[in-house]
């Protein structure tokens, strides 16, 4: 006989525990099921550990640049075991926090194991049957491992297994020139590894404008990262103790191989057919504007619904579901404005449309661009790489998008994002008085020099 709950949440990633807490607070007898890591990708093998490693890499890089700032740090040596220990400690603190939070929730039971639908509103968790009228999926995703000739014969890493590396690779080959791959590329180059990035497309970061991509490539190449584009017909093989990657008549040998070529949802072993849950060809669960699936009483939040592969979009999914269920607040996915960052150093903060999308929309555009070399705070900090760019609808005067590649760009871009949500004209920021000396104080100047695009 099945154990009966009012609600079941599958997955303890970003959205799951928060929703379980709200369900319990509302008096619903709730189960939250997690088969592996409390906190999901972000806490364990994503945002938190990678940004911790990036912080260590930046400290190393700054120490090596001491002469530019008037001091000498001597021979900077990287102890990757110590770097990893710092990362592991921060991850444990976050993971333990999630575990303790869930353990203290009212009306919520944590169940460990793999959940799979056996029928509508019915689950099997390692031989235990569970039922509920409301089931919420927060199953996340994992690294895509491509079908490449020779791959079964060579050792390789993904973003998850990369978290276990405790020595600096002699030569790290990264297949994939997008956000995850480029963050690891700069990080390990700063730790002291030779790094080569191999990308099958003719450009890095296909989502970004050409000028943004060109500057990101220049930033990485200045630090010694090798980059190969248009790498079709990829093959890998063992070459003694090393790994050989072959493409387009070229051969690169390295000590370690990392694949960062995309993500796939954790839906292939969920029993979606038995539950009547529709998904697309890649396995992403089809949802409406309020995260409801095709199955009655089933919602999907986070990476597996294909509506955003970010921690912040997963959290927003939770907010949308809770608002509609309990607050009589009809929030929806289509209300949110795309925003994300590339956490290289300096970072890229991106909101709204890119330039190609804005032009395709048919709007009459205004465009502003300013090099970071013009910004006093950037010169003072010795961080003058990059630029700021903004796009405006010439008729409505509303901001359409922005790219800030430079010092604190991942933080500064939020001033643009907030104006976009408020639907205020760009002149609201242009006429604001900002603090000097900051990077943000140049946003009004940038907006005061808009030109037709």
Image: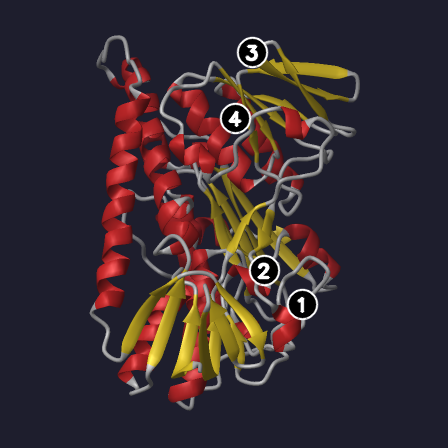
Residue 229, percent across and down?
70, 28
Please give the count of numbered marks on the rendered protein: 4
Q: Residues within 10 Å of mark 1 (few under 14, many from 20)?
A: some
Which residue is rendered at x = 31% and y = 54% of the image?
434
Q: Residues within 10 Å of mark 3 (few under 14, many from 20)?
A: few
Q: Residues within 10 Å of mark 4 (few under 14, many from 20)?
A: some
Query: For this view, does 381 lie left or right of residue 337?
Result: left
Residue under the image location 44 percent in, 24 percent down: 188
Mark 4 secondary-structure assignment: helix
Task: From the viewer's side, name the closer residue of 109 and 379.
Answer: 109
In the picture of the structure, the residue carrying the numbered disc 1 is 279
How much space separates mark 2 and mark 3, taking CA atoms?
A: 36 Å
Query: Is label 4 or label 1 in front?
Result: 1
Image spot of residue 22 (x, y percent): 32, 78
Distance, label 1 to label 2, CA atoms, is 13 Å
Q: Could you tell me which secondary element the residue under label 2 belongs to?
A: loop
**How many neighbours does mark 2 have within 10 angstroms: few (below 14), some (14-19), or many (20 or more)?**
few
Quarter of the rendering occupied by the N terminus: bottom left
């Amino acid at each position: 006989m099945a154990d009966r709950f009012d609600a079941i949440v599958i997955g303890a990633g970003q959205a799951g525990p928060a929703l379980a807490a709200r369900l319990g607070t509302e008096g619903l007898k709730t189960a939250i099921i997690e088969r592996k890591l409390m906190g999901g990708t972000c806490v364990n093998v994503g945002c938190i550990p990678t940004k911790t490693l990036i912080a260590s890499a930046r400290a190393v890089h700054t120490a090596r640049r001491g002469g530019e700032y008037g001091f000498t740090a001597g021979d900077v040596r990287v102890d990757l075991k110590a770097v990893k220990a710092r990362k592991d400690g921060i991850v444990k603190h976050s993971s333990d926090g999630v575990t303790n939070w869930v353990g203290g929730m009212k009306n919520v039971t944590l169940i460990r194991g793999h959940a799979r639908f056996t029928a509508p509103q019915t689950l099997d968790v390692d031989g235990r049957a569970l039922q509920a009228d409301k089931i919420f999926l927060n199953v996340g995703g994992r690294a895509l491992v491509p079908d490449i000739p020779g791959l079964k014969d060579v050792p390789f890493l993904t973003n998850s297994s990369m978290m276990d590396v405790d020595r600096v690779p002699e030569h790290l080959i990264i297949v994939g020139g997008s956000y995850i791959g480029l963050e690891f590329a700069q990080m390990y180059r700063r730790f002291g590894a030779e790094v080569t990035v191999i990308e099958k497309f003719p450009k890095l970061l296909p989502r970004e404008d050409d000028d943004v991509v060109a500057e990101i490539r220049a930033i990485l190449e200045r630090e010694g990262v090798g980059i190969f584009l248009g790498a079709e017909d990829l093959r890998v093989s063992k070459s003694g103790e090393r790994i050989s990657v072959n493409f387009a008549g070229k051969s690169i040998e390295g000590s370690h191989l990392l694949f960062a070529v995309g993500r796939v949802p954790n839906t292939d072993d969920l029993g979606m057919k038995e539950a009547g849950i529709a998904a697309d060809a890649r396995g992403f669960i089809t949802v409406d504007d309020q995260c409801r699936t095709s199955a009655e009483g089933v919602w999907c939040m986070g990476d597996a619904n294909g509506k955003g592969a970010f921690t912040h979009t997963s959290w927003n999914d939770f907010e949308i579901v809770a608002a509609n269920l309990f607050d009589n607040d009809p929030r929806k996915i289509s209300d949110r404005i795309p925003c994300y960052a590339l956490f290289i150093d300096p970072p890229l903060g991106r909101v709204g449309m890119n330039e190609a999308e804005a032009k395709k929309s048919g709007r009459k555009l205004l465009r502003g661009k300013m090099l970071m070399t013009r910004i006093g705070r950037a010169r003072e900090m010795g961080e003058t790489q990059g630029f700021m760019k903004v796009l405006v609808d010439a008729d409505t005067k509303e901001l359409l998008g922005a790219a800030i590649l430079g010092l604190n760009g991942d933080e500064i871009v939020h001033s643009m994002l907030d104006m976009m949500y408020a639907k205020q004209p760009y002149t609201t920021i242009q006429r604001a008085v900002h603090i000097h000396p900051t990077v943000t104080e140049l946003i009004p100047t940038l907006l005061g020099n808009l030109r037709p695009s």
